[in-house]
């Protein structure tokens, strides 16, 4: 007799996720009576006061819940001040997470330079030299290790810079820098900006919502153009600048007959060493002794994006797959570093055989095994972890891996996009700018960010991508949104033939690029800032990021990092739409400051929109408005699409006579 399926209130499986692999595991979880984030979200209604930003707990005269019109906290704080403070504190936490990740990479680079980082080397010395030049470090005739040392030290100093402008804002368009300078918004080091937020939002400090939020923008810029940008650059220098490769995503990448190790979190530092350890001959033969055919590494979340785009390590899925991977019964070790790791994992893992292994000095979880990472002994630690996973393989119970996976082509760094569009000898964004100017590409949308169990997993990401492609909008993606696109076949060149409008399809045919470009992890949204700046520098699309027909959307966001990203994009001039709910809904004034107020001030804004159809309508409206302001031809799909491969396919359908008529305007002459 099969176990009786427990009766649960809540959503149907299809309302929880559109992903067939997730659906299969959610059915399995229900059969086994297991809770997941999906069911917990159904059981836990969000606190309405916290959800709309009107709960203040910054001092112990409170917490104060502002629920009535005109109500203030014990200190007299208004709903505007409370919502603005909460939003600014979320920016601080999000920016801290990204930027601290960048700092750790600077320490790793220094350890490599000093020959003390076991197993690492500089994989992109050209990018190292370029960054050194940008940071004003002499490069002529100097060995790589010296450059790495100076770059590491200079980057570290960026985090704690107390006065003056951080270096990387020089990458922004001239007009943008002038605006930031005029507004006194150019960030100092991120540590200083975050401390400033925490100080001014302490009880009894800054109480002007616009003023609080302006500091929120400054700190977010310190992340986007500072900490995150450093993280991206140093990851490329240490682990290689991504270029396209072929891999696969979804739970079907787990293997029944091999030891499965899943790396989850955000940092590539340890996972790169675990990858190296999985091919260690001694460990491979140890796995065979235990009855496995080999060792299989897969990723979840943004650690996955890091290893997927550089090494082609397959991805077992995005944020909401972390528990589902364990429910397959096939994960011998889930190795986590930092950010987006659910505390539910060790408890769930106990029901199976999975070891949850924490590795960051910053992250311990009760019930998990802690094997602390130290870059000085990285390979030894990685081998210890891999051995632990192998030893756990014989403890497996029933295994249920859904046979669902999709091919993907990730790895579009801004350097590669530049090269791909411009050719080997003269890399350039000119073809992209020309395609936008001609209307072949209507505009660009960055679909980024998380999954959130309060909405159907992947449904908004998938819908937005399909609709934008139909409307000739090029997509760039990072984070869990990028993995979502991979699951549904959008990260492939063929996607252009199937889904893209006529103009975008022509561009993809000419360049061979997919219509949806995977640009990395959530910290790599800094790459999108760089692309936008380079598009402006190329000419023809205005003088500032705010002129470019581009929109950023995080339809299923859940983390504070998403708020930091949205804020640095808006402060850089971009229109940003966030789904799920409005975290400042309790204050129409603050909602208006983030949208109309910021648009007047910095040319970019954040709007909170729940319905995906409305996100598409607003995004296309914004793109068309920007096209009009640039005096570009109005978008007209009828003008394009009868060329390239499409034309060949069309001609192949015709008889020889019809083909001759179509090509030469007269029937074939016969013999
Ligand atoms: Fe209440 Fe004011 Fe304290 Fe906030 S700062 S908890 S509103 S007394
Ligand atoms: S992992 S921050 S759920 S994108 Fe970067 Fe995904 Fe969002 Fe975490």
Image (tube, rainbow, N blue to C red):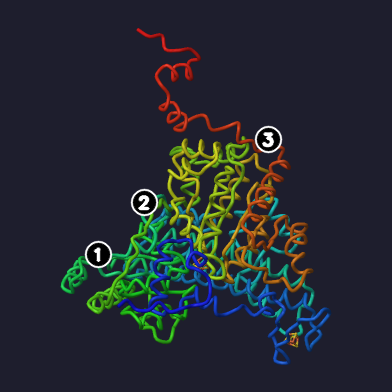
Left or right: 444 as drawn, with respect to 394: right
* Residue at 69% across, 74% down: 52
Q: Quadrant of ligand 1?
A: bottom right
Labelled disc at residue 279 = 1
Where is residue 411 shown, x and y percent of the image? 43, 53
Question: Is the CB of the residue bearing disc 2 within 8 angstroms of ligand 2?
Answer: no
Quarter where residue 435 is shown: top right
Labelled disc at residue 633 = 3
Where is residue 384 shown, x and y percent of the image? 28, 77
Labelled disc at residue 246 = 2
Question: Is the CB of the residue bearing disc 1 within 8 angstroms of ligand 2?
Answer: no
Instruction: Tell whether label 3 touches label 2 (CB within 8 Å).
Output: no
Instruction: Tell whether label 1 touches label 2 (CB within 8 Å).
Output: no
Q: Vertically, is 569 above or below 58?
A: above
- Mark 2 and mark 1 lie on one chain; the one further toward the N terminus is 2
Q: What is the crowding at mark 3: few (fewer than 14 residues within 10 Å), some, or many (at least 20)? A: some
Instruction: For residue 143, say whether it is visible.
Output: no
Instruction: Kindly state the secondary structure of the residue where label 3 is placed.
Output: loop
Left or right: 458 as drawn, with respect to 219: left
- Camera-nearest residue between 393 and 510: 393
Quarter where residue 180 is shown: bottom right
Where is residue 195 shown, x and y percent of the image? 64, 77
Q: Quadrant of the C terminus?
A: top left
* Residue at 43% across, 57% down: 487
Instruction: Kindly state the secondary structure of the residue where label 2 is placed.
Output: loop
């Amino acid at each position: 007799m099969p176990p009786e399926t427990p009766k649960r209130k809540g959503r149907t499986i299809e309302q929880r996720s559109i992903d067939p692999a997730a659906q299969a595991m959610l059915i399995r979880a229900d059969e086994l009576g297991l809770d997941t984030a999906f069911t917990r979200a159904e059981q836990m209604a969000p606190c309405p006061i916290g959800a709309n930003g009107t709960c203040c707990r910054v001092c112990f005269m409170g917490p104060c819940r502002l629920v009535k019109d005109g109500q203030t906290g014990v200190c007299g704080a208004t709903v505007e001040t409370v919502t603005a403070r909460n939003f600014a504190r979320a920016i601080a936490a999000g920016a801290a997470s990204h930027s601290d990740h960048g700092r750790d990479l600077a320490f790793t680079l220094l350890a490599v330079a000093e020959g003390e980082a076991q197993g690492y080397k500089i994989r992109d010395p050209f990018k190292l030299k370029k960054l050194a030049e940008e940071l004003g470090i002499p490069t002529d005739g100097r060995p790589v290790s010296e450059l790495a040392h100076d770059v590491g030290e200079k980057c570290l100093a960026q985090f704690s810079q107390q006065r003056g402008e951080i270096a990387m804002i020089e990458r922004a368009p001239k007009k943008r820098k002038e605006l930031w300078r005029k507004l006194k918004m150019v960030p100092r080091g991120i540590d200083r900006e975050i401390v400033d937020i925490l100080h001014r939002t302490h009880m009894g400090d800054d109480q002007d919502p616009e003023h609080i939020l302006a500091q929120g923008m400054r700190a977010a810029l310190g992340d986007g153009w500072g900490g995150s940008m450093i993280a991206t650059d140093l990851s490329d220098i240490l682990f290689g600048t991504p270029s396209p490769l072929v891999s696969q995503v979804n739970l079907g990448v787990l293997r029944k007959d091999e030891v499965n190790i899943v790396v989850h979190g955000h940092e590539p530092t340890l996972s790169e060493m675990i990858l190296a350890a999985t091919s260690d001959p001694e460990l491979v033969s140890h796995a065979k002794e235990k009855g496995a055919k080999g060792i299989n590494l897969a990723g979840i979340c943004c650690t996955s994006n890091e290893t997927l785009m550089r090494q082609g390590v397959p991805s077992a899925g995005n944020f909401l797959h972390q528990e589902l991977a364990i429910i397959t019964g096939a994960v011998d070790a889930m190795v986590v570093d930092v950010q987006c790791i659910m505390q539910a994992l060790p408890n769930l893992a106990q029901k199976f055989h999975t070891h949850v292994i924490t590795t960051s000095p910053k992250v311990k979880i009760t019930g998990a095994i802690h094997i602390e990472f130290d870059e000085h002994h990285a390979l030894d630690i990685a081998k210890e972890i891999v051995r632990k996973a192998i030893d756990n393989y014989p403890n497996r119970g029933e295994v249920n891996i859904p046979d669902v996976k999709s091919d993907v082509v990730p790895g579009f760094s801004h350097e590669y996009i530049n090269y791909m569009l411009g050719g080997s000898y003269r890399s350039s964004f000119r073809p992209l700018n020309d395609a936008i100017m001609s209307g072949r590409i209507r505009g660009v949308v960055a679909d980024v960010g998380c999954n959130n169990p309060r909405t159907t997993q992947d449904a908004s990401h998938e819908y937005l991508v399909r609709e934008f492609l139909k409307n000739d909008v090029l997509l760039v993606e990072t984070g869990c949104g990028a993995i979502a696109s991979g699951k549904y076949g959008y990260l492939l060149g063929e996607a252009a033939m199937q889904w893209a409008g006529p103009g975008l399809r022509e561009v993809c045919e000419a360049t061979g690029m997919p219509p949806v470009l995977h640009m990395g992890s959530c910290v790599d949204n800094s790459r999108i800032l760089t692309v936008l700046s380079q598009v402006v520098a190329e000419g023809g699309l205005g003088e500032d990021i705010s002129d470019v027909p581009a929109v950023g959307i995080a339809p299923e966001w859940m983390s504070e990092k998403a708020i930091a990203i949205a804020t640095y994009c808006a402060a850089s001039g971009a229109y940003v739409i966030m789904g799920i709910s409005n975290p400042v809904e309790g204050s129409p004034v603050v909602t208006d400051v983030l949208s109309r107020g910021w648009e007047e001030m910095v040319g970019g804004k954040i709007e909170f929109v729940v319905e995906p159809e409305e996100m598409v309508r607003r995004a296309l409206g914004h793109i068309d408005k920007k096209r009009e302001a640039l005096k570009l031809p109005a978008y007209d799909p009828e003008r394009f699409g009868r060329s390239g491969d499409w034309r060949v396919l069309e001609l192949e359908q015709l008889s020889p006579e019809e083909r001759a008529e179509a090509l030469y305007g007269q029937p074939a002459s016969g013999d």
